[in-house]
Amino acid sequence: VVPLTLFVALTPLFILAGVNYYLFKKNMRSELFHQVSQDLSNTSRSLESVIEERLSALRLIAREETIAELSEHARTEKALQNLKSAFGGFVDLGLIDSRGRQISYSGPYSLEGENYQNEKWFHQVLHSDFYVSDVFTGHRKLPHFVVVVKQGSYLLRATVEMELLNRLLFIPGMGGADDVFIVSRAGLMQTTSRLHGDILDQCPLPVPPYSPQDEVIEDFDDQGISYSLGYSYIEETPFVLIVIRKRADLLYEWFRSNSELIGFLIGSTIVIFVVVLWSLTSVVKRIRTGDLQRAQMLENIEYTNKMAAIGRLAASVAHEINNPLAIINEKAGLVSDILSSSDDIPCKERLSSAIVWIQKSVERCGEVTHRLLGFTRKVPVRREPLDLRELLTEVLEFLQKEATHRNVVIETDFPQSFPEIESDRGQLQQVFLNIINNAFAAVAEGGWIRLSLQAIDPHHVSVAVEDNGCGISEEHLKQVFEPFFSTKGEFGTGLGLTITYNLVRKLGAQIEVKSELGEGSCFTVILPTGRQS
Amino acid sequence: MKSMRVLLVDDEEELVLTLAERLNSRGIDARAATSGTDALASLRENRFDILVVDLKMPGVSGSEIIKIVEREFPQVRILLVTGHGGSELEEPTEQRSEVLLKPFKIEDLIAKMREMLNLPEGCVM
């Protein structure tokens, strides 16, 4: 029951928290998505314009200057200086003729006369007006890329420093798991990235398929962390800009920004736990107590019914026997009368003795039947206020002589103040006389009997009669209140406790017995104070 | 001085006859009746001081006799004898009714009757 209740109580709470986390995640992802799209569009636009600017600058020079002018080293040098100062980012400038030979060169290397006829870009540029190379090391063994424009049959070629691209790739607000880099359409890194390798390494990610617009993909990495990858093919260049943003610590973020919700979740979980456990435990306990009480009640009813049935049976048997007993008694009495009035009867002494025995036996039978009849006799209960301490003291006075004679110690544990109860004095006296008498029969010489009084609650008091006598075995304990059950042998009728039991029931009280063989017994009578109504 | 006059009523014939004989031998004028009808007839013919009656009898029951006696012979004292200790005793009886449970000693019966008639101890007359 407990796990089920906890499950029912806690599930909605956790579902709510789950939904909240899911929405948070969704929000974060969409935020990430927008961030990446924005980064991507800003950066790709700058990239495009930077490259476009370089191409335009080259075109301007190609148009302004004639081929002859540009063939002069000084003019090339001047043009390079102009480019550097006006636009920046240029490293060198060269003029190449239609056969691929560099006729004029200005820059930090001595590349004049270099032949580019076998270079791939040379052939490509011949078919279009301009060319932007991917990054390569080339003659100078340093990564760079070149932009080329065609002017007639000549090509104007300039090297662009990598710093120009690197500067563009700085995006503010990039976290530890975020990255931005350029990759060539062939999959080589064009810039050094933080997490995806150095320049000219093979990019660990596959090159995304071509798309004329910016694209953002959402995916999960090897560790199951979601990320947004944006890519943009820079038109007329071999470059693909890639922006990656990750939220590795999404759960942490969620915990951080929802601390109140989490606190509430933990708090309510604890409260639910405690309340469910406490309430279920107490309910189960109450049910168990109720069951026990019901079982006890049923047992009591059963026992009462049994006793009543036995009582009725005993009374009817007693009645049937009483009439013949009365006849025997009278006939014996008559014989006795006759014997005592005539002298000449043979064996008179023996006959007289026999008659005496018949009369004694009738008397004994009569005692038994009279006690049996006592079960069903419904003497009305006369209630009067009485002090149990007084009543018990009176009862003890009856037995004082025997106690002294047998050296039995009688202890009384009566509280200083004890509530008066309303009950039948005579019947209570009989009840306690019977119980204490039994205690006397049980204790050996020098034993003790203890009477104690206790107020259990405002409506009930108890009287306990305890002794250190022979005790009652467990199997006999069940029978002590049944008629004709006696451990006193021929000295007991087996009716004392039965009568006691019936009287106790009649007074609305209960009697309980606890005993251990050889240790002693304790009879407890629980009496209603009779003042509740 | 007249002796104590007693009418014994019980359906157990042997009981009342023997009892009457024994009472007679003790100087008490006792007569026996074995049914309610006999008893009423006897009551109408003779004067009695005490009616000793069993409550449970076939025909006219003890309690019916008591009612009639209380009404018609208010001077007669009633002593109930019964083998029952039970239900019939709960019925309200007049204050002057006394009860004796069977079997009883004849001495107890005589003592009881004497007590009812306020006679001194030892006197049966």
Image (cartoon, coloured by chain):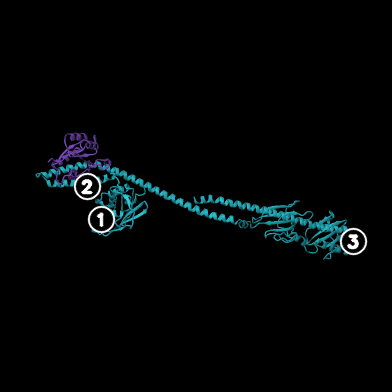
Chain colours: A cyan, B purple
Q: Can marks 2 and 1 be said to lie on one chain?
A: yes
Q: Quadrant of the C terminus of chain B?
A: top left
| Position of residue A86 measured from the top left corner of the image (x, y, whole percent) | 82, 61
For the image, the number of numbered tags is: 3
Report helix, strand or loop for mark 2. helix
- Amino acid on which disc 2 is placed: Arg
Q: Are marks 3 and 1 in contact (CB under 8 Å)?
A: no
Mark 2 neighbour density, 10 Å: few (under 14) some (14–19) many (20 or more): few
**Residue nearer the viewer, A99 or B57:** B57
Q: CA distance from mark 3 to mark 1?
A: 151 Å
Residue A390 picture quarter:
bottom left
Q: Which residue is mark 2?
A: A364
* Label of residue A124 in the image: none
Which one is earlier in the sequence, the residue at label 3 or at label 1?
3
Q: Is residue A15 left or right of residue A168?
A: left
Report helix, strand or loop for mark 1. helix
Q: Which residue is mark 3?
A: A69
Q: Chain of mark 2?
A: A
Q: CA distance from mark 2 to mark 1?
A: 27 Å
- Amino acid on which disc 1 is placed: Glu
Does residue A297 sit above or below A202 in this rendering? above
| Position of residue A268 measured from the top left corner of the image (x, y, whole percent) | 54, 54
| Position of residue A185 measured from the top left corner of the image (x, y, whole percent) | 76, 55
* Label of residue A397 in the image: 1
- Amino acid on which disc 3 is placed: Glu
Does residue A391 sit above or below B22 in this rendering? below
Q: Can marks 2 and 3 be said to lie on one chain?
A: yes
Mark 3 neighbour density, 10 Å: few (under 14) some (14–19) many (20 or more): few
**Residue nearer the viewer, A328 or A467:** A467
Which of labels 2 and 1 is toward the front?
1
**Residue nearer the viewer, B5 or A106:** B5
